[in-house]
């Protein structure tokens, strides 16, 4: 008795898998090609480094937001928290608000760049931790807690600064925003180092695996012995830390801390994370995707500016891309289940 077997069906390229894994990167490359075709000077080194400077600030916050969204959370307060941390850093750097409008470095009356940096990241971390406690202990949804934080931190910023900017820092502090290491801007190096550390934490540590587990199924993670509430609090501390670090770098770059700093950053940061492939429903995403998402937003904004598109239209385009990214994420999930 002989049996015959059908020849194995040849499988073509997995278009679905390629889109799922490399979609944001392919879109980024397509944007670069389009903008370069429109204006070849778009890829000049000067403009490339300008784009990298632009994305380094929002990119730092996006790294922290990645941890939050991986747990199926959200933080709408990051722009206001950045402004508050920047104002705290400025007060420490200048030694008070008496000479807030002066562009001079203050004659050594302040406490120096290190104290300013320390103050910014501590304030950001504590603020994030308080929001995390409210979410876990009071059982208030992250959207509501951080929406309240958005207005609270902006109000604290206005109160601290009396509504005005604090300007004029010494050269050692300004270096973190405007300095170069070779041809590479210092903010870009800070962002790259932070991204590498976050990648290592999420990919190769128990804590990183716990973050993914909580985002994938919080109840199952709890039953498996993970302290879910502690992990949730920790991710809000992390995003607060990065908001403080970004605030310090932004203040150093502008040589000023302003009460209006960070307005609209929430949309940019969340867009970078979601467009980079991190699911709003938790458990799926990566730091590499966030870096690509931040670069995509930066290239898009810069390219539109290069072609004299108004800032109002830029906001519309970014908002539409965010909606499409979330819809694409839902479509991918439905395809994975089918």
Image (spheres, helix red, strand yellow):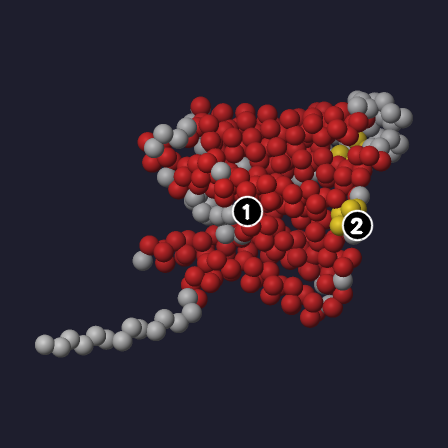
Which residue is at a point 69% across and 27% down the rendered structure image? 118
On the image, numbered disc 1 is attached to which residue?
A: 287
Q: Quadrant of residue 129?
A: top right
Report helix, strand or loop for mark 2.
loop
Q: How many residues crowd mark 2 within 10 Å: few (<14), some (14–19), many (20+)?
A: few
Q: For the view shown, which residue lies furthest in the front direction?
A: 1
For mark 1, give the secondary structure: helix
Residue 248 appears at what percent x and percent y?
72, 35
Foreground: 76 or 108? 108
The answer to whether any part of residue 144 appears in the image is: no
> Is residue 130 placed above or below 267 in the rendered structure?
above
Give 102 or 286, whichever is nearer the viewer. Answer: 286
What residue appears at the point 39 percent right and 72 percent down from the top-left corner?
A: 12
Check the image and report above or below for 330 versus 282: below
Q: Which residue is mark 2?
A: 182
Identity of the residue drawn at 44% across and 28% down: 229
Quadrant where the N terminus is found in the figure: bottom left
N-terminal-most mark, 2 or 1: 2
Q: Where is residue 34? Give x, y as percent.
A: 65, 68
Residues under labels 2 and 1: Cα distance? 26 Å
Tell me residue 114's x, y (percent). Answer: 75, 28
Classify residue 163 as left or right of residue 292.
right
Asked if residue 55 lies left or right of residue 183, the reply is: left
Image quadrant in which you'd find residue 29: bottom right
Where in the figure is residue 325, as x and y percent of width and height? 50, 54
Of the pair 130 and 53, the residue shown nearer to us? 53
Q: Is residue 9 left or right of residue 258?
A: left
Q: Nearer the viewer, mark 2 or mark 1?
A: 2
Q: Is residue 13 left or right of residue 28?
A: left
Quarter of the image where the C terminus is located: bottom left
Q: Is residue 9 above or below residue 274?
A: below
Q: Nearer the viewer, residue 197 or 296?
A: 197
């Amino acid at each position: 008795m002989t049996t015959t077997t059908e020849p194995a069906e040849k499988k073509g390229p997995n278009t679905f898998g390629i889109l799922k894994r490399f979609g944001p990167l392919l879109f980024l490359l397509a944007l670069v090609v389009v903008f370069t075709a429109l204006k070849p000077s778009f890829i000049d080194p000067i403009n490339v480094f300008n784009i990298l400077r632009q994305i380094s600030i929002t990119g730092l916050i996006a790294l922290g937001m990645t941890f939050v969204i991986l747990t199926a959370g959200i933080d709408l307060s990051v722009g206001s928290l950045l402004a508050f941390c920047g104002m705290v850093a400025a007060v420490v750097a200048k030694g008070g608000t008496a000479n807030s409008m002066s562009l001079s470095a203050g004659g050594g009356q302040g406490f120096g760049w290190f104290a300013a940096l320390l103050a910014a990241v501590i304030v950001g971390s504590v603020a994030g931790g308080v929001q995390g406690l409210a979410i876990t202990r009071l059982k208030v949804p992250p959207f509501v807690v951080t929406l309240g934080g958005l207005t609270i931190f902006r109000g604290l910023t206005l109160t601290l600064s009396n509504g005005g900017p604090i300007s004029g820092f010494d050269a050692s502090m300004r270096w973190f925003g405007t300095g170069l290491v070779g041809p590479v801007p210092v903010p870009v190096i800070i962002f790259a180092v932070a991204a590498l550390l976050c990648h290592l934490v999420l990919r190769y540590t128990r804590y990183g695996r716990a973050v993914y587990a909580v985002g994938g199924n919080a109840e199952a993670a709890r039953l498996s012995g993970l302290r879910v509430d502690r992990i949730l609090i920790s991710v809000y501390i992390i995003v607060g830390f990065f908001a403080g670090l970004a605030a310090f770098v932004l203040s150093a770059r502008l040589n000023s801390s302003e009460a209006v700093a960070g307005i609209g950053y929430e949309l940019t940061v969340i867009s970078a994370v979601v467009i980079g492939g991190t699911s709003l429903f938790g458990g799926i995403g990566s730091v590499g995707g966030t870096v690509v998402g931040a670069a995509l937003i930066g290239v898009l904004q810069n390219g539109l500016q290069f072609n004299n598109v108004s800032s109002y239209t830029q906001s519309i385009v970014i908002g539409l891309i965010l909606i499409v990214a979330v819809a694409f994420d839902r479509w991918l999930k439905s395809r994975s289940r089918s």
